[in-house]
């Protein structure tokens, strides 16, 4: 097995045991766990990530809906203003003749 030692360098190593694994628990701290405990830790992390992803997808959907609503409102305002400009231009042209 190749183990990274930093700077793009690796060292060859042999796995002495597969009964325990070292699992990071946060803040740079790692602890030794049995395979089943490590599997549960990883499973829980995956579940938490999926929940976070779902929440972010919902938020994104809400933002996109709001943007679409704002775009529709902007289009309506733009159309209204364009109509006023055209009406104003016609009145100016009529008053000149």
Image (cartoon, grey):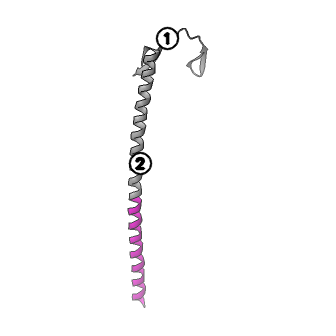
Most distant residue in the bottom direction: 97
Q: Give me the residue at 38% from left, 54% from top.
A: 66
Q: Was residue 46 drawn as part of the magenta stretch in this picture?
A: no
- Magenta stretch in the rendered image: 70-96
Q: Position of residue 87 (x, y in %)?
A: 40, 79
Q: Position of residue 49 (x, y in %)?
A: 43, 32
Q: Give me the residue at 38% from left, 75% from top.
A: 84
Q: Earlier in the sequence, mark 1 or mark 2?
A: 1
Q: Is residue 55 above or below residue 77?
A: above
Of badges 1 and 2, the one in the foreground is 1
- Dot 1: element: loop
Report the front residue among 43 and 97. 43
Q: Is residue 49 above or below residue 79?
A: above
Other residues around mark 1 within 10 Å, as few (<14) / some (14–19) / many (≥20) = few
Report the front residue among 49 and 88. 49
Report the front residue among 89 and 66. 66
Q: Position of residue 42 (x, y in %)?
A: 45, 24
The answer, for residue 74, to whether it is visible in the render is yes
Name the quarter where the N terminus is drawn. top right
Q: Position of residue 83 (x, y in %)?
A: 41, 75
Q: Which residue is mark 1?
A: 19
Q: Is residue 85 above or below residue 9?
A: below
Name the quarter where the C terminus is drawn. bottom left
Q: Which residue is mark 2?
A: 61
Q: Give me the residue at 41% from left, 46% from top.
A: 60
Asked whether disc 1 touches disc 2, contact meaning CB atoms under 8 Å apart, the reply is no
Other residues around mark 2 within 10 Å, as few (<14) / some (14–19) / many (≥20) = few
* Image quadrant where residue 30 sits: top left
Q: Characterize the magenta stretch by its predominant secondary structure.
A: helix
The answer, for residue 28, to whether it is visible in the render is no
């Amino acid at each position: 097995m190749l183990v990274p030692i930093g700077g793009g360098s690796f060292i060859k190593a042999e796995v002495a045991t597969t009964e325990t694994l070292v699992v990071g628990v946060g803040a740079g701290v790692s602890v030794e766990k049995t395979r089943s405990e490590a599997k549960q830790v990883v499973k829980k992390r995956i579940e938490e990530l999926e929940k976070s992803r779902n929440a972010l997808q919902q938020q994104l959907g809400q933002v996109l809906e709001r943007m679409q609503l704002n775009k529709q409102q902007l289009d309506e305002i733009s159309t209204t203003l364009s109509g006023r400009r055209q009406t104003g231009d016609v009145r100016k042209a009529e008053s000149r003749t």
